[in-house]
Image (tube, rainbow, N blue to C red):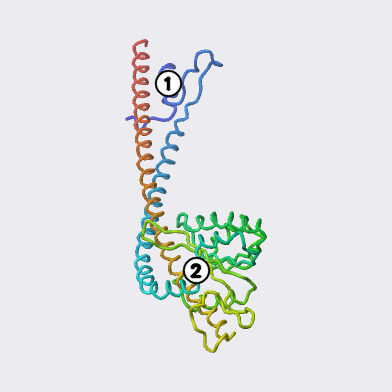
Amino acid sequence: RSSRLKPQACNMLPARRAAAVATRAFVREAPTGGAGGVVAIQTRGMAESLFDMRTRIAATENVAKLTGVMKLVAASKLRGCEMRLQAGRPFGGSLLNSVTEKTKEEVEGEESTRKASHQLHVVISSDRGLCGSVNSNMTRALAPTVKALEAEGDTIDIFVCGDKGKQQLSRMVPTNIVHAITDAFDKDPAFGLAAKIAEFIVARDFDVITFWYNEFENAARFNVTTKRVPKLAGLPVGQRPSLFKDYDVEPEDNEEALANMMEYGVAGSLYYMMLEAQCSEMASRMTAMDSATNNANEMVDALTLHYNRARQAKITTELTEIIGGAEVLQAGEADD
């Protein structure tokens, strides 16, 4: 029978009962000492808040799934990188050591007699981010080194391989960057690319090249490494590079032979360092994505707990309002 009642039928209710029905869920008395009257309750606000929390939980769960997939992809690529590095390390490491200058400790011991030099620093970074501190460790170590060498009178030029290294060094030592190559280091290293870079490097004017790269140790550890390669070609006639004092060069003191050795040594060493850098990048990305996945899952748990508490509080509030409204109705009927 109530379904056939017209909207005006509510006017038949007693005034107090109609007022209670109309206002029990939407108004409350003003606090003591307030302006008096009634204040609207934000009943829809709680629903919107719960909706926002559900949306945030779903979004965070999606982030956890995405970072989990990125971790698996990085782990899969790391296995391939390690295989290529293990195959290339015997020859690449030997070639790099054959064209590398004295160790850092030996160079520091000769600083009292050193002369100002023109140095070219080659930084091997990555094009992609989300790989932890693999790039920032190098740039943070390079920037103070450049300033210290400039204070001693050296001329420092920086050649950057990789977009991330370029972005960071552009903020730290922008005036020292002479060239940068980007959008070429997000793929597997190729000797052809290393040869082109080496051809460009050896054509520049310098006294010594310092390579900066990450040396892969294991999936959880990599080390920022520097290697100094002196100039092998372009020396005065009859002067042999100190690196080759125990070797015979045929034809003797041939400029073309030394130039070819310089370019090939830089190209082969650069290719080997690119393999090391790629392994370090993939290992760091796998670790970073694992940490991101764990953090996202912890955030989902915390948000879910907060959501359940808010939902329970909302249900408790609604039950309290229903009970209070029922008591008001009973009191109104008793007065009638």
Q: Position of residue 223 (x, y in %)?
A: 44, 59
Q: Could you tell me which secondary element the residue under label 2 belongs to?
A: loop
Q: Is residue 224 left or right of residue 232?
A: left
Give the residue pinned by disc 2: 185
Q: Residues within 10 Å of mark 1 (few under 14, many from 20)?
A: some
Residue furthest toward the left? 1
Q: Is residue 221 left or right of residue 111?
A: left
Give the residue pinned by disc 1: 18
Compared with 226, 4 (above or below) is above
The label on residue 115 is none
Taking the spot 59% from the left edge, 58% from the top edge, the residue there is 169
- How far is the residue under mark 2 from the one under mark 1? 74 Å
Q: Is residue 150 left or right of residue 102?
A: right
Q: Position of residue 171 (x, y in %)?
A: 62, 55
Q: What amino acid does circle 1 point to? A: Ala
Q: Could you tell me which secondary element the residue under label 1 belongs to?
A: helix
Front-lying residue, 279 or 292: 279
Front-lying residue, 47 or 203: 203
Dot placed on the residue nearer the N-terminal end, 2 or 1 = 1
Q: In the figure, residue 152 lies in which quadrant?
A: bottom right
Compared with 63, 92 (above or below) is below
Q: Position of residue 6 (x, y in %)?
A: 41, 30
Which corner quadrant holds the C terminus?
top left
Are dots 2 and 1 in contact, CB under 8 Å? no
Residue 203 can be seen, yes or no:
yes
Q: Residues within 10 Å of mark 2 (few under 14, many from 20)?
A: many
Taking the spot 37% from the left edge, 14% from the top edge, the residue there is 332
Q: What amino acid does circle 2 point to? A: Phe
